[in-house]
Image (cartoon, rainbow, N blue to C red):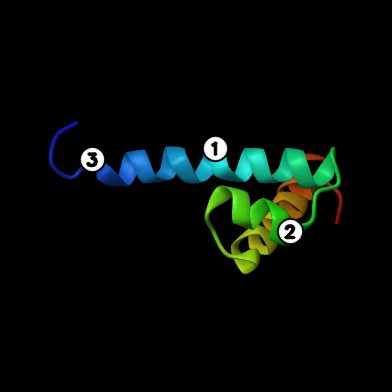
């Protein structure tokens, strides 16, 4: 990975973290605080991930 490429890696990690958070909160019912602690981020970060996920689903399904 050359100079200036660390942003790509961060984006990949952030997306993986978001996918994990959506799955364990949505399918397994873990609390935001539990997920945040296990992923090493704040509860607020998980809350934002979840709200973005809901907006993305609405956009994908053309739901207003």
Along the line of sight, which residue is nearer the eye, 19 or 39? 39
Q: Using the numbered discs, state the Cα–Cα distance from disc 1 to disc 2 in whole angstroms.
A: 16 Å
In the visual, does 5 lie left or right of 15?
left
Compute the Cα span from label 3 to label 2: 31 Å
Q: Nearer the viewer, mark 3 or mark 2?
A: 2
- Disc on res. 5: 3
- Asked whether the beta carbons under mark 1 and mark 3 sit within 8 Å of each other, the answer is no
Residue 16 got which mark? 1
Looking at the rendering, in which quadrant would you find the C terminus?
bottom right
* Residue receiving disc 2: 32
Nearer-the-camera pick, 58 or 52:
52
On screen, residue 20 versus residue 28, left or right, reads: left
Please state the horizontal and vertical placement of residue 30, each as a whole percent of the image.
Answer: 80, 49
Query: Which is in the foreground here, disc 1 or disc 3?
Result: 1
| Mark 1–mark 3 distance (CA, rounded to whole Å) | 17 Å
**Crowdedness near tag 2: few (<14), some (14–19) or many (≥20) residues, C-alpha within 10 Å:** many
User: What SS does tag 3 mark?
Assistant: loop
**Quarter of the picture holding the N terminus:** top left
Residue at the image position 57 percent from the left and 49 percent from the top: 39
Near mark 3 (Cα within 10 A), the count class, few <14, some 14-19 or many ≥20, is few
In the picture provided, is 38 more to the left or to the right than 32?
Answer: left
Front-lying residue, 51 or 40 = 40
């Amino acid at each position: 990975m050359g100079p200036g490429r660390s942003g790509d890696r961060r984006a990949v990690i952030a997306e993986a973290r978001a996918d994990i958070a959506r799955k364990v909160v949505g399918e397994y019912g873990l609390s935001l605080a539990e997920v945040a602690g296990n992923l090493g981020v704040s509860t607020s970060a998980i809350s934002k991930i979840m709200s973005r996920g809901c907006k993305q689903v609405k956009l994908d399904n053309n739901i207003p």
